[in-house]
């Protein structure tokens, strides 16, 4: 265990902004792979927002109809994440090809 990173007790120090927070305030503490981490409620909310924004980027350029078609196919065929991403990329390439005409 890395010194100072034990996640015991109710007092924690955020790895991003270095503020101290308690379990009662919220936030999260645990491991990112093998690295122990702690995020205060504000930094954790910001981290979640960043991930959500990055996740939405893969859909840029597709209509709601395109998105729904891919998601329904994913459910019907029980695709894993890799296949869904491949389908998104194929649909984007198709749309880009149409735009060049």
Image (cartoon, helix red, strand yellow):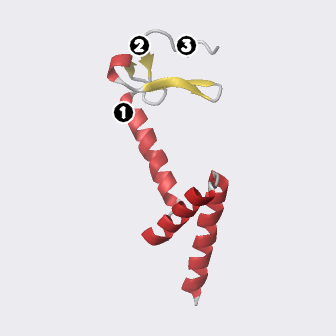
Give how far across and how far down residue 59 sits, in percent. 51, 63
Give how far across and how far down residue 48 sits, in percent. 44, 41
Q: Is residue 3 visible?
A: yes
Q: Is residue 91 left or right of residue 67?
A: right
User: Which image quarter: residue 3?
Assistant: top right
Residue on which the image places disc 2:
11
In the rendered view, would you say 23 is above or below 33?
above
> Around disc 2, counting alpha carbons within 10 Å, would you say few (fewer than 14), some (14 to 19), or many (20 or more)?
few
Question: Along the line of sight, which residue is nearer the eye, 79 or 3?
Answer: 79
Label for residue 94? none
Whole-Å distance between the Cαs marked 1 and 2? 16 Å
Residue on which the image places disc 3:
6
Question: Along the line of sight, which residue is nearer the eye, 24 or 15?
Answer: 24
In the rendered view, would you say 68 is above or below 35?
below
Label located before the other in sequence (1 or 3): 3
Which residue is at a point 50% across and 59% down the rendered structure image? 57
Which residue is at a point 64% across and 29% down the rendered structure image? 33
Question: Along the line of sight, which residue is nearer the eye, 4 or 54?
Answer: 54
> Around disc 3, counting alpha carbons within 10 Å, would you say few (fewer than 14), some (14 to 19), or many (20 or more)?
some
Whole-Å distance between the Cαs marked 2 and 3? 11 Å
Q: Is residue 63 visible?
A: no
**Quadrant of the rendering where the C terminus is positioned:** bottom right
Q: Secondary structure at mark 3?
A: loop
Mark 1 touching mark 3, by CB under 8 A? Answer: no
Which residue is at a point 40% across and 40% down the rendered structure image? 46
Q: Secondary structure at mark 1?
A: helix
Whole-Å distance between the Cαs marked 1 and 3? 21 Å
Give how far across and how far down residue 56 sits, in percent. 47, 56
Q: Residue furthest front?
A: 76
Q: Secondary structure at mark 2?
A: strand
**Quadrant of the rendering where the N terminus is positioned:** top right
Residue on which the image places disc 1:
42
């Amino acid at each position: 265990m890395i010194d100072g990173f034990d996640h015991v007790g109710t007092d924690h120090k955020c790895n991003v902004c270095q503020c101290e927070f308690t379990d009662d305030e919220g936030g999260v503490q645990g491991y990112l792979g093998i690295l122990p981490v702690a995020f205060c409620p504000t930094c954790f909310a910001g981290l979640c927002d960043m991930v959500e924004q990055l996740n939405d980027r893969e859909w840029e350029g597709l209509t709601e109809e395109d998105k729904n078609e891919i998601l329904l196919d994913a459910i019907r065929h029980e695709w894993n994440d890799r296949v869904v991403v491949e389908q998104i990329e194929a649909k984007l390439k198709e749309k880009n090809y149409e735009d060049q005409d």
